Image (cartoon, rainbow, N blue to C red):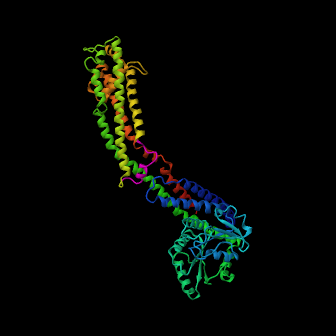
């Protein structure tokens, strides 16, 4: 009684499990299609080919078969050049449905032959793409023959197409000859079939009667060694030169076997068996793909670490130069000497005893002090930032291009979105202008001439500073932060402790801008790190699909 109760439960569970499996396979197909290999690491081409192969297997065989599980079963007639595949297909059908001849490679376009009543079930089968389809009553309903290009064709496109068709088939009829069965290629292909659990039949063509027993024995031994001991083996005698299909008696054993498989129940059994084998073979394929994806993510981390190490000494050196007054070297120091010389603009603002002078001459002097000095300060900061960026760019490029550098670095060095010298110069100019603008805002705030609360205590000092004006005060503070000692002293003299705070803030701001300029040279690495194809969870998603697949298969 228990068994009678359990059976309906199991019957209801099977469709649910099949639906779950189909969802997992579709999700795997979607995630595999999204997978890319931007870093071009060693072996990426093989990984990319494996990805394409997996996509083809999912889209052209598994998903269609899991969705419809239609008959007829599709049998690919595969084999090396000159094995007689097309002649065999014509002989099984009993008519010239595919071109055969002595010109190699003969089969340039695949031909699918089926019984006319199977036209509708095959209408949307993926193997119909770019092949010739022929309906003929010489084949029984339930089985279709696909005459594929040569697996060892001299035409690369033919070879690729032949392997692709073989992987989308439900059954392989592998055709070889008494002189070719020892070649490496047939056994590589047959090993793939055995690994996938594909139903295989071996056709040994053009065998001389005198050597039939020996060749059959050797071939069967090889098949057992490779897990194909249960695969049927058909030996066709060598009938000598001929044209057209072989005599029906020659192919009769193979014809009868195909007729048995054409039975609907047997055909569905072939489809299910190959489907199970193909699903099982996915485990290794997905694992291999996930490993390749993870390798990319690991390489990104190696690149980021190498770039950080390359930029660390540059950062230290450039910051040290700024603190030693590199921004003030040249034009800024010369300008300051000119402005503070006897009779210069600063003496028109401040008297010998530090009093602030008024009148039209002092007003003109304020402009003469501020504008040229601010321009020189912006230019000095820009040159310093550009130089820091250039040294950082050279360090990054050298690290990425180093043969002993991080894997994938050379690809990043030539990345189309890599940080350029022009981009670095533009950022340096904007950053330098922003630094001088920050000085002006800070001075205005201190003098209570802008947003914020005045930091100057009340008394004579605030009156003195306000009389000098925000722009000359900012110019002096910026020059002091840049490394002009006299300007630093004047700023403190005018603003007291608040002047020291202002100088430190402007100096820290400049140092931060140097660090940002150096860090910007690593932006190409950041660009790659943000690439969704290199996200850490890409491999995790594939492994999650694999875990679900293993659970359901």
| Highlighted range, magenta | 405-420
Instruction: State the residue in front, 110 or 450.
Output: 110
The quadrant the C terminus occupies is bottom right
The quadrant the N terminus occupies is bottom right
Whether 467 is drawn above or below 292: the answer is: above
At 43% from the left and 58% from the top, the residue drawn is: 42
Whether 83 is drawn above or below 441: the answer is: below
Whether the magenta-drawn stretch holds residue 277 is answered as no
Whether 96 is drawn above or below 516: the answer is: below
Q: Position of residue 112 (x, y in %)?
A: 66, 68
Q: Position of residue 137 (x, y in %)?
A: 74, 73
Q: Looking at the rendering, which quadrant does residue 508 occupy?
A: top left
Instruction: State the residue in front, 458 or 332.
Output: 332
Q: Position of residue 22 (x, y in %)?
A: 62, 58
Q: Looking at the rendering, which quadrant does residue 500 occupy?
A: top left
Residue 552: in sight, yes or no?
no
Whether 393 is drawn above or below 376: the answer is: below
Q: Is residue 39 left or right of residue 350?
A: right
Q: Is residue 267 left or right of residue 325?
A: right
Q: Looking at the rendering, which quadrant does residue 452 occupy?
A: top left
């Amino acid at each position: 009684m228990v068994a009678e109760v359990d059976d309906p439960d199991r019957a209801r569970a099977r469709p649910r499990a099949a639906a779950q499996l189909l969802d997992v396979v579709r999700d795997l197909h979607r995630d595999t299609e999204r997978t890319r290999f931007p870093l071009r690491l060693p072996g990426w081409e093989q990984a990319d080919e494996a990805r394409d192969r997996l996509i083809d297997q999912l889209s052209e065989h598994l998903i269609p078969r899991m969705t419809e599980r239609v008959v007829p079963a599709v049998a690919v007639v595969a084999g090396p050049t000159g094995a007689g595949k097309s002649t065999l297909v014509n002989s099984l059908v009993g008519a010239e449905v595919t071109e055969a001849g002595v010109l190699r490679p003969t089969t340039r376009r695949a031909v699918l032959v089926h019984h006319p009543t199977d036209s509708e079930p095959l209408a949307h089968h993926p193997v119909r793409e770019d092949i010739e389809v022929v309906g003929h009553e010489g084949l029984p309903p339930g089985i279709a023959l696909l005459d594929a290009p040569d697996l060892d064709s001299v035409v690369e496109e033919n070879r690729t197409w032949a392997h692709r068709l073989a992987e989308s088939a439900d059954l392989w009829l592998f055709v070889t000859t008494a002189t070719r069965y020892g070649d490496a290629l047939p056994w590589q292909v047959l090993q793939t079939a055995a690994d996938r659990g594909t139903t295989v039949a071996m056709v040994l063509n053009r065998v001389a009667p005198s050597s039939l027993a020996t060749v059959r024995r050797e071939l069967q031994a090889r098949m057992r060694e490779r897990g194909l001991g249960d695969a049927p083996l058909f030996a066709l005698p060598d009938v000598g030169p001929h044209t057209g299909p072989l005599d029906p008696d020659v192919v009769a054993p193979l014809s009868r076997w195909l007729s048995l498989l054409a039975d609907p129940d047997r055909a569905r059994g072939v489809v299910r068996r190959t489907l199970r084998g193909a699903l099982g073979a996915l485990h290794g394929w997905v694992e291999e793909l996930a490993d390749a994806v993870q390798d990319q993510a690991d390489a990104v981390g190696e690149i980021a670490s190498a770039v950080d190490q390359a930029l660390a000494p540059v950062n230290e050196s450039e910051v040290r130069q700024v603190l030693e007054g590199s921004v003030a070297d040249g034009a800024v120091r010369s300008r300051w000497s000119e402005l503070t010389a006897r009779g210069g603009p600063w003496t028109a603002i401040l008297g010998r005893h530090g009093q602030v002078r008024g009148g039209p001459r002092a007003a003109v002097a304020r402009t003469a002090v501020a504008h040229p000095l601010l321009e020189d300060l912006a230019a000095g900061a820009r040159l310093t930032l550009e130089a820091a960026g250039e040294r950082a760019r050279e360090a990054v490029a050298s690290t990425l291009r180093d043969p002993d550098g991080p894997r994938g670095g050379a690809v990043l060095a030539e990345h189309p979105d890599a940080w350029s010298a022009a981009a670095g110069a533009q950022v340096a100019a904007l950053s330098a202008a922003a630094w001088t603008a920050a000085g002006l805002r800070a001075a205005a705030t201190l003098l209570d001439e802008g947003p914020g609360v005045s930091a100057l205590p009340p008394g004579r000092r605030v009156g003195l500073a306000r009389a000098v004006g925000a722009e000359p005060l900012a110019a002096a503070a910026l020059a002091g932060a840049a490394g002009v000692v006299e300007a630093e002293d004047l700023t403190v003299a005018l603003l007291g402790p608040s002047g020291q705070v202002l100088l430190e803030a402007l100096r820290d701001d400049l140092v931060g801008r140097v660090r940002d300029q150096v860090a910007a040279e690593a932006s190409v690495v950041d660009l790659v790190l943000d690439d969704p194809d290199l996200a850490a969870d890409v491999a995790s998603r594939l492994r999650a699909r694999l875990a679900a697949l293993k659970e359901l298969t």
